[in-house]
Amino acid sequence: MKAGLLHYGRLLLSSFILFIVVITVLFFLLELAPGDPVQALVGDVPLTEEFRERIMAAYGLDKPLWERYLIYLGNVLRGDLGYSFATNAEPVLDIILSRAGNTLAIAMPSFILSTLGGIVLGSIAARTRKRWLDGGISGIAVGLFSIPNFWFGMLLIMVFSITLGWLPTHGKSPYGQPGIYWEYMVLPIITMATTELAYKARIARSAVIESLGQDYIDTARSKGLSSRRVLWRHALPNGLLPLVTVSGYSLGFILAGSVLVERVFGWPGMGLLFVDAIERKNNMVVLGITIMLTITIIIVNIITDVIYGIVDPRLRARLAPKQEVTT
Amino acid sequence: MTRQETRTTGPSSPAPDARTAPLAVRERSHGGQGAAWRAFLRRPSTLVFLPLVIIFVLVAVIGPFFVTDPVATSFPKLLPPSAEHPFGTDMLGRDYLARVVYGGQISLLVGFSVAVLCMTFGLIVGGLAGYFGGWIDTAMVKIAEFFQVLPGLVLALVAAAVLGSNIVIVGALLAITMWPGVGRIVRAEAMRISKLGYVESQKAAGFHSLRILWSDVIPNAMPPVLVATTMTVGRAILIESGLAYIGVGDPSNPSWGGLLNEAQSYMRDSWWLALLPGTCIFLVVLAVNMLGDALNDAFNPTIGRVK
């Protein structure tokens, strides 16, 4: 137990340091960016020097760089991501949270669909005796992750929205309507899920093939278990360990990919906000979104590690002897 | 730790190791790989996709001599594909075939140069990290972790917005964010190979570390590195196209992704604008990935199908 705690303590510490490094790199990178936050705040009107100084002082922009960095870092750790200068000094966190729900509404279904679909297709491909089925699934998987994801979305729009007229092309609801309508979610979710599904199917296939080759599978077979039971009870649980890691990272890829997918479908989530903020040099929002993304990925990584520790008996065993040494 | 231990136990039996060493080297680095290369070249997917990649490269290199000026707005706007304009014309009346050919130059150049840069960085840093361990190993693992937590696409977007978005900067950014992928593979291979008997015996015989790295570790690590590098070509083309689609890149010299950015507003009536550059990206990336798979299968025949 003590060894387990030590392991997770070190994991938390290194994640925290990584987080600080990410903030630091991005903060100084964005400091290099041309652009004038005060001008961005008031819009395209001439400024008096006195007014400028007042604004600079009000937002702490007159302080030296390193001091602003430390203040920003302190604020982030307290959950304050600063103010968006381009949009009437709204708090960045509020802007992001108002969009986060929209992104999650398509990202989470994509994550679940791609994980389940990937496992099922990968296992079928690994186990089937029909070469054409395996070849077909594997070939489609390579094909799907060779497609530029955003272009796949454009193709879906051209086929299902423009040609067939079944689904809307753009946005999350009919013009002026609040909320999210399901017709609008279908194509973005499919687009987001495809690449990840193909990737996971490949991983699942090779993982299951590898675990089907292990001795304990022969043991299970020789006990007379049905091949379905061998797959679901013996090969899959062990074979899917690598998929836990892959799934953890895939959530990060899906969220990062939302930048492209949301642009294709005009989906008003964090990805669109991010592109918009970059175009308008709205640095605090850019920084804020990147920080939120990083936190999400780090938390998912920690959860992945914990799940791994629970499901992987080898890891449990490796942690246990250490405990004898330390106590 | 383990390396230290094996080194201290090494000299106790130097003679048999030293005698078997040259044989092992020859076997591993030449005979085995030659057969694998022949197996690679005989694979059906190689026969299809290697020529495809070569055709795309040839078109990018010599195509510009055969097409019209890609920026001359001398034709009617938005003509669908025809005998005169096989790819149609775009919204400003430019020959789209010419634009796709020139766009391919950018996309392929980025893809291949990023992959070569990644392989070079990966071999150097990953090789040193895996062979020597210690601080350089820790540093590499941390850098790889950094790029795992901060997706390359996001970092490249931010950095390109700051540093300006010409194609050299985009390529450099992709190489910086993507090399740890190759580096980790080299590192794992270098760790494995440096513990092999004949490498241990070379160490015991006092060979210089860099010489062992160069003439034994790196050649033997090459198969998985080549697979990863091949895959990197495809991934770099994909990420570059995504960045260009969002508007990062040189708008007066658009890659395939840049053409798709322009095509977005014309999807309703001018399908060829979106369809053709995307198909090119898809075919090249597919070909490269299939070649990567074929390489992998040729060099790892053990990972095959279950009976």
Image (spheres, coloured by chain):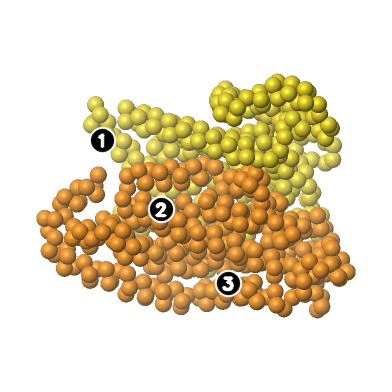
Chain colours: A yellow, B orange
- Residue at 71% of width from left, 60% of height from top? B254
Residue A61 is left or right of residue A137, and the answer is: right
Can you tell which mark lies on residue A321?
1
> What is the C-alpha distance between the residues marked 1 and 3?
52 Å
Which three-letter amino acid code belongs to the residue tagged 1?
Answer: Pro
Q: Chain of mark 1?
A: A
Q: Which residue is mark 3?
A: B53
Tags 1 and 3 touching, CB below 8 Å: no
Q: Residue furthest front?
A: A49
Q: Residue furthest right?
A: B76
Q: Which residue is mark 2?
A: B125
Q: Quadrant of the N terminus of chain B?
A: top left
Vertical arrangement, residue A21 with respect to residue B301, above or below: above
Quarter of the image where one finds residue B110: bottom right
Q: Chain of mark 3?
A: B
Dot 1: within a 10 Å radius of its alpha carbon, few (fewer than 14), some, or many (20 or more) residues?
A: few
The nearer-to-camera label among 2 and 1 is: 2
Q: Nearer the viewer, residue B298 or A232?
A: B298
Residue A45 is left or right of residue B258, and the answer is: right
Where residue B268 sits: x, y (%)? 82, 58
Q: Chain of mark 2?
A: B
Q: Nearer the viewer, residue B294 or A78?
A: A78
- Residue at 18% of width from left, 68% of height from top? B20
Q: Quadrant of the C terminus of chain B?
A: bottom left
Where residue A254 sits: x, y (%)? 60, 45
